[in-house]
Amino acid sequence: MKYFKMLPVLLLSAVLSFTGCNDKTSTPTKDALNATEVSKTPSKATTTTPPPTNLEPAQNTAGVWHYTCTKGCPGGAGSAVNCETCGIRLAHNQSYHTPVNMNTNTNPSAIPYANPPVAAEPSRNAAGVWHYVCSKGCEGGSGTTGACKTCGTALAHNTAYHQ
């Protein structure tokens, strides 16, 4: 009975000693450390990002560049890179996306439903009458609606202008 108290201590020490001698450790061995050599010269870093796939050509069928220089330098590119001439970042050219006009007829009357541009009316007619005048009778007037320059009230349409 005297030795039964020492039995658990002996069993615990035996288990610890057997597990401590296990060869399957997670630390690398001396041979494994020697196998990994470090290069003395740095190598070029390789990029892991693939180059972008450009689905559209740099120029459309009319020869318009997708990105052009804002300073008007000749040429362009298919993406927003720096200008080869001045170094400024190229801007998107919206006219690249406009469809090519297959109709080469420049006569506007031949285009169906084309409205001719309306010429702006002059501020005064041939008699010197203003198109818009002050409703309070201030001197002067304007060719468009707005405020009187003298008193600040709204200008009224002058029907005498059209006579």
Image (tube, rainbow, N blue to C red):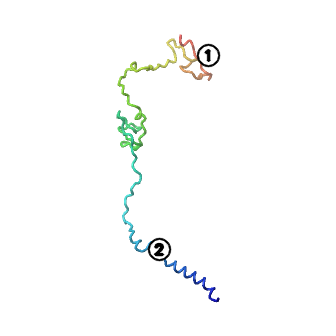
Identify the residue shown where x is 57% and y is 82%.
11
Location of residue 79 (image quadrant): top left
Q: x, y percentage for residue 134? A: 60, 18
Circle 1 — which element?
loop
Q: Nearer the viewer, residue 36 or 140?
A: 36
- Using a 10 Å C-alpha cutoff, classify the residue at mark 1 as few (fewer than 14 neighbours), some (14 to 19) or many (20 or more): few
- C-alpha distance separating marks 2 and 1: 107 Å
90 displayed left or right of 154: left
Q: Nearer the viewer, residue 148 or 30?
A: 30
Q: x, y percentage for residue 155? A: 59, 20
Vertical comparison of 138 with 29: above or below: above
Q: x, y percentage for residue 106? A: 37, 22
Mark closer to the observer (2, 1): 2
Location of residue 53 (image quadrant): top left
Vertical comparison of 12 with 156: above or below: below
Circle 2 — which element?
loop
Question: As drawn, which residue projects farthest toward the right?
Answer: 1
Label for residue 24?
A: 2
Circle 1 residue? 137
